[in-house]
Image (tube, rainbow, N blue to C red):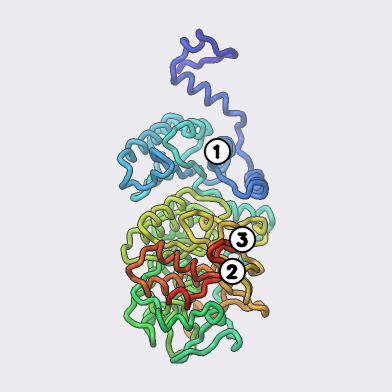
Amino acid sequence: MKKCVFLLLTAFALSSCSNDDLQTSAIESEIVQTDPLTTRQINDQINETTKSKGRFSWNESSSYFLWSGIVRGNKIASIGFGDSKDDFDRSQSANSEALQSEILEVISKYEGKKDRVLMASDQYLNQIDVYIEKQETVIALRKLKSIRYFEPADYHYFENENKIGGIAKSSGSSSGCGLESTVLNSADYTTVSPNAKAPWSFAKHNITSAWNYSTGAGITIGLIDSGVSFNQTLLSGSFNNGSSSGRTISKNGVYVDSVWPWSSGFDGADDKCGHGTSMASAMAAPRNSLGQPVGVAYNANLVSYRAASNVVLDGYHEQEGVKLAFTALANNTSVKIISMSMGHIFSVGKIEDGVKYAYSKGKLIFCAGGTSTSFTTFVGVIFPAWMAETQAITGVKENTSNQKCDVCHSGAEIDFTYQMERASGNNIPVLSYYNAQTDYVGGSSVATASTAGIAALVWSKNPSWTRDQVLAKMRQSSTYYPTKNADYGYGNINVLQAVQ
């Protein structure tokens, strides 16, 4: 192909070059670097932008920065496309195949190859994963009007931050994992018939009194997390036990346990972290005579998805797993509520699409507002809790509605709070990962799972209601209604009031 080189844009220059030539020249003029940024340089800029602007977005970064992130992320990119910013549903998009083909043609052209271009094409969303090596390809793609977002698909921000800080790749303090068991302090629960332990927080939110009106029967909650332990029988074969009956639990796995993004084969539904088991217990553990902690909605159904290895959605398989879980729960007509206590400090396009897809199907979605790690204390409400389609939840200290727990995040996007931290430092009693054992769990994670359980109580009392009616009732029964608090939303929910 002929190349046009000119210093002054004249009529002669325009008439001497084809459109392809001009586009090539424009692309070449934008390339100013040949070596990608280091992971330290990328992370430093992400952190600086987050601190100064509140959020970081790959869409708002330069083509060079985006290309660097793609190269440092196994040369895989995630692309969302459509005729408009809201054109995410493949079934509602008449143009999806044509737009996808156009993108793949541009990649083939600038990469100089026909094979190993498309890695994955989503069944339900206008979203694809592709292989990209050249900066020219990134620049050319960003000129297409059909692209809604364009991001690295396997950039490990948290792992790189750990390496920079000299921290082990996976630490319990940042991953949310733990398989420990702890004997409960008798001050942290009350015994309710037939011999179940109601966590101390239930009295603070009038949950035990609300059980006279609703127990969550007939409502199905979808849980997106690290799975649910098969070693905990009360969340397995004995899910129907004691006063909990006539309900079901379904466990699914959509996570691929591999460092290589192109690997396939789901790792199963069993929790290997412990976090998901704690969340399942907080929202729906059975009420029985075994002297174990009971969940908020002890008669609700539960559909769990093992979507990631831990709470940090850092890498291709974690983000892909969460997207798949959202779309699967969206298409499950029995599911009314979705709870996810995982996230990231910046947006992930494919997960955002999954959330919007689930919301479009009428699901009521609760997401954790954020729990700090050693290097994310500067972050406000995390993704996807900040999305308009989700209800962002954070944890507060006992007897307060505007004093966040020691590791919880707060901010304008928070919708509700849940009391989960005592003066003693103890959190919420739950079933342990192992059978016949107990533990404590805290942070915005348990606040989110507990609030999802509250929503199940409200919806069970009013089964014909829509999502918006359930949400309105929860707001009307909260501390700050009708005016949201600047950092804590509507505050704590009085559940008895919400079900009356």
Nearest to the eye among marks 1 and 3: give it: 3
Q: Which residue is mark 3?
A: 487
Q: Position of residue 405 (x, y in %)?
A: 64, 69
Mark 2: amino acid: Gly
- Seen in the picture, residue 445 relative to 192 is either above or below; the reply is above
Q: Position of residue 52 (x, y in %)?
A: 67, 47
The picture quadrant where one finds residue 378 is bottom right
Q: Earlier in the sequence, mark 2 or mark 1?
A: 1
Pointer 2 local density, CA inside 10 Å: few below 14, some 14–19, many at least 20: many
Secondary element under disc 2, as helix, strand or loop, is strand
Front-most of residues 38 and 319: 319
Query: Could you tell me which residue is drawn at 61 percent across and 87 percent down?
Result: 187
Q: Which residue is mark 1?
A: 67
- Seen in the picture, residue 495 relative to 76 is either above or below; the reply is below
- Whole-angstrom CA distance, mark 2 to mark 3, is 12 Å
Query: Could you tell me which residue is drawn at 37 percent across and 33 percent down?
Result: 102
Can residue 136 be seen by looking at this rendering? yes
Q: Where's the N terminus, which quadrant?
A: top left
Query: Could you tell me which residue is drawn at 51 percent across and 80 percent down?
Result: 206
The picture quadrant where one finds residue 269 is bottom left
Q: Is residue 63 left or right of residue 96?
A: right
Front-most of residues 22 and 134: 22
Secondary element under disc 3, as helix, strand or loop, is loop
- Seen in the picture, residue 204 relative to 306 is either above or below; the reply is below
Q: Which residue is mark 2?
A: 395
Mark 3: amino acid: Asp
Determine whether label 2 and label 1 are within 8 Å by CB: no
